[in-house]
Amino acid sequence: MNLATQALPPTAGTRTLLLYCMLVIASLAMSACGGGGSTAEQTPAAIAVCDPTDPGTAAECGSVIVALTDADGDFVNYTVDVLSLKLETANGRIVETMPRQTRINFTDYVDLTELVTVATIPPATYVAGTITLDYDAAEVYVEADGSAKAAVVKDLNGVTMTQTQLKVRLSNRDQLIVRKGLPSLLQLDFDLGASHTVDIVPSPAEAVSEQFILAEIDPVDEKDIRVRGPLVAVSLDEMTYTVALRPFHDRAGDFGRVKVHVTDKTEFEVNEVVFVGADGLRALDAAGTGTPTVAKGTLNVAERKFTADIVLAGTSVPGIDRDAVVGNVIKRDGNFLTVRGATIVPSDRRTHFHDDVVVEIGPETKVFRDGYRASDLTTNAISIGQRVTIRGSQPTPTTDALAPQILFDATQGSVRMHVTRLAGIVNTVMPGQTDITLYSIDRRRQQIFDFTGTGVFPKDDADPANYEIATGSLTLADFAAGKPIVARGFPTAFGTAPPDFKGRTVIDYTDVRSELGVGWGSAGTAEPFRSIGPDGLVLHNQNPDIDQRHYIKQGPVLIDLTALDSDTTIVPRESDRLAFYIKTADSIRMYSGFDDFANDLSTSLTSGGNLARSMHARGKYDVDTNVFTAYKIGVYLLEP
């Protein structure tokens, strides 16, 4: 569910969906995740004598780390090829950061960011970036009545997209300065959600895109980071290992070097054996150079240091030696699991999407769980809703995403259970437990999940209308009843409910991230706001030009802006980083300060003769005061 999902009445012939896709670029100097500070107040640097193709000039070069992430949306798969990613200096020099093209699925990166490349670049002042995407072999699927439906991406003129090039220019006070030995940081936000709509009635569905790409000197959105690649070296003394970056599911190429730090608490699974801390690092060292690895953890922005929480290596990496399936369990019949929204990672072919895969497990199937460091789990631990990566074999390979259910054999394989995300509305709060009306699991509607067999007795099977979350000490206020909630954790072992879910983190309505989206049609409007000032924007909620996009999404709840009693006030948050932008047909103007953004917006609408086409914001919403506190705001203007 997103801002526009219920924009039309049930009898309408179309439903509008929004895709929130973000491309993040972290630019670091020679240390590439080593120590260092910000360069925000330094003067621009001239281009040094640096030839990225000449190892003899490496000491004069900097480096750029490219990462990818995505935000919530109703696309169940959005895979395209990235052909090129270039940075432009102040004097017009173009620097390519991608050593080769790579294939990405934006929907893989809702809750994390993946490092894509570490490129050697000359020290300079960089003022713009350009990314080239190829849709010729795109795999795009939207959710329609709980199932996947193929979609074709078109531009505003109704022409099917093939290749597209997007460019963004940084504001004068927020340009990227790269110096040798001094880390700097830049984030590019590839935001299709600002203008991406889908008509699900045609076959295939039609996705119309006006593509955005934003740039921020410091990242506004921070998520867990994933690093993939074959092992280069291990340092037990430093408690680190280094990989040759190979992002996504690429099987070849070298996208640069990244150092991964580990701690005494880092969880390892090496060749399907569990280790912790230094023991895991020793096992990784014993596995040898070239061993495939994938790590998830956090990046300390101040220190430019990536630390892993979980490391998989060798045969524990999906698609190594054996095929793999990634998705959510929607049904269980004995030893047969139905996995919906599956990504199939073959050991000898290209990764592809498949809507439903039936997986057979058995007594020999190994079971692991994120954050659980023992090896005593059985297949009984796998219940409905669980996010899983399953390793085994696909006896009858197919690349048809919508083919009838296919069988995957994991009877001699393994299952890793991942942290699963719930969204719903609080029913009751009691010590150690919160009961909710369940709306979605990992952003798939609860209606697709068959909870039969989850309870000790049939009467105890999980009930979406009163889904029971064990919260332990993660208590909520009594007044949370009736409010949105997001919980992360694991479904209770199959056949053992209640409770239905064991929460690791619980986020109530006061902290649930919200998104605001409003459109004023293809012709735009001259009065999108009642007022524009340094303290905020007051939205004109009853503007007659408002189209089907006029919602605030707060967790699983959609709030109709046009049904509110007063106009909505949008204010910047008081602390932490901010990002604002104004898009026109051929450019994007970026601001890190709200005053500059508000002044430009006011002048453009009152003196420049521009019309507002759409607006999007992310932050937190207070229902009682009708105030949206934003960390990111974007407005699309139509120029005269």
Image: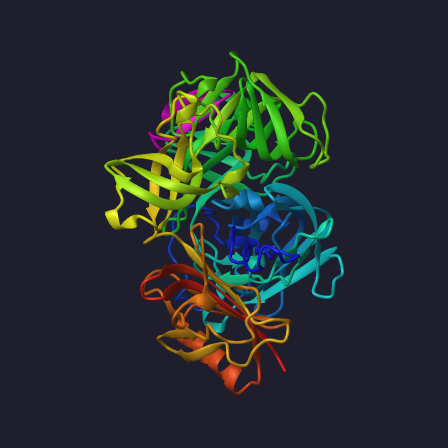
Q: How is the image coloured?
A: rainbow
Q: Is residue 298 above or below residue 239?
A: below
**In this view of the protein, can residue 271 be seen by the observer?**
yes
Q: Please indicate, yes or no, whether residue 281 appears anywhere in the rendered image.
A: no
Say which of 177 and 11 sits in front: 11
Q: In which quarter of the view is residue 241 placed?
A: top left
Instruction: Report the magenta residues as a range.
Output: 263-284
Does the stretch in magenta take in 522?
no
Left or right: residue 618 versus residue 77 is left
Q: Residue furthest top?
A: 363
Instruction: Give percent across and percent down for residue 557.
Output: 44, 53
Nearest the viewer among 252 and 6 is: 6
User: How many dots with numbers?
Assistant: 0
Q: Position of residue 530 (x, y in %)?
A: 43, 79
276 w.r.t. 80: above or below: above
- The C terminus: image quadrant: bottom right
Q: Position of residue 618 (x, y in %)?
A: 44, 60
Residue 270 on the magenta span:
yes
Residue at (46%, 26%) from the top-left corner? 383
Rendered position, 590 above or below 324: below
In the foreground, 33 or 62: 33
Determine the image quadrant of residue 164.
Answer: bottom right
| Residue lying farthest to the bottom in this orientation | 607
Give the image location of residue 182, x and y in percent: 43, 55
| Figure check: 61 above or below 169 | above
